[in-house]
Image (cartoon, helix red, strand yellow):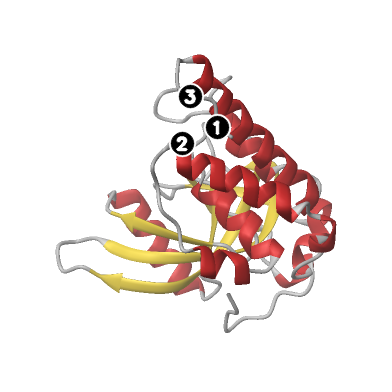
Amino acid sequence: MPTNAVYEKPEDLVDVIPVFPLPGALLLPRGQMPLNIFEPRYLAMVDDALRAGHRLIGMIQPDAAHPGLENKPNLYTIGCVGRITQIAETGDGRYLLQLTGIARFQVEDELSVDTPYRQCRVSYSPFTGDFQARKGEDEVDRPSLLRALSDFLKANDLKADWEGIEKAPNEALVNALAMMSPYGTAEKQAMLEAPDLKTRAQILVALTEIELAKKTMGGETPLQ
């Protein structure tokens, strides 16, 4: 999704950003993530991002394998920064907003701050390819991806807009399916950290095949 701001290189982004730790939440470049913001600390985070003018929030997952403190969990070192591209007030103290992913980042250090939300100094340099739309999508094995998706939908008695899916470019398709996938924190992190779009698609297909195999082993009729 295009934004009103143009980000062509790491230097176009600020290197200190507020971070929103959220298990199972995967934001990817040019993907859209809806958020329902209601906790006071994150309402303040949104207000400050808007006031600062950059409108940026870093989505990052708590590290489930090394949880740390309950009120301040350890974080993975890789996240994705998004820009607030839609926001609405609900009238009951909440914000409904949409983040559009810009680029992944690596946490360099977490700052000691007075704000109720956490802030990190980050580097986007390891992910310069994220600034180039549709990079590497010709390498994606689209037939395998669509086959895995079809099998997953059948196994779970789900429907999909196949006309829209077939028209979607590979980058949009892979990233949307990865973001919507029902897998756990570690699996989502693996897809986030994939070095390229082809690898992300391969991880997504492998996870889907593992999930389907579990259903088969559980006594269901094997998928044809």
Provide the residue designation for mark 3. 221
User: Which of the pair 148/104 is nearer the observer?
Assistant: 148
Q: Amino acid at mark 3?
A: Thr
* Amino acid at pointer 2: Ala
Q: Is residue 146 visible?
A: yes
Gap in angstroms between the C-alphas marked 1 and 3: 6 Å
Sequence-wise first label, 1 or 2 = 2
- State whether residue 75 is above or below residue 66: below
Which residue corresponds to mark 1?
Answer: 223
Image mark for residue 54: none
Task: Kindly check if marks 1 and 3 are in contact, taking CB atoms under 8 A apart as contact.
Answer: yes
- Circle nearer the N terminus (2, 3): 2
Residue 142: quadrant of the picture: bottom right
Viewer-proximal residue among 159 and 116? 159
Mark 2 — residue? Answer: 155
Instruction: Check the image and report above or below for 184 versus 29.
Output: above
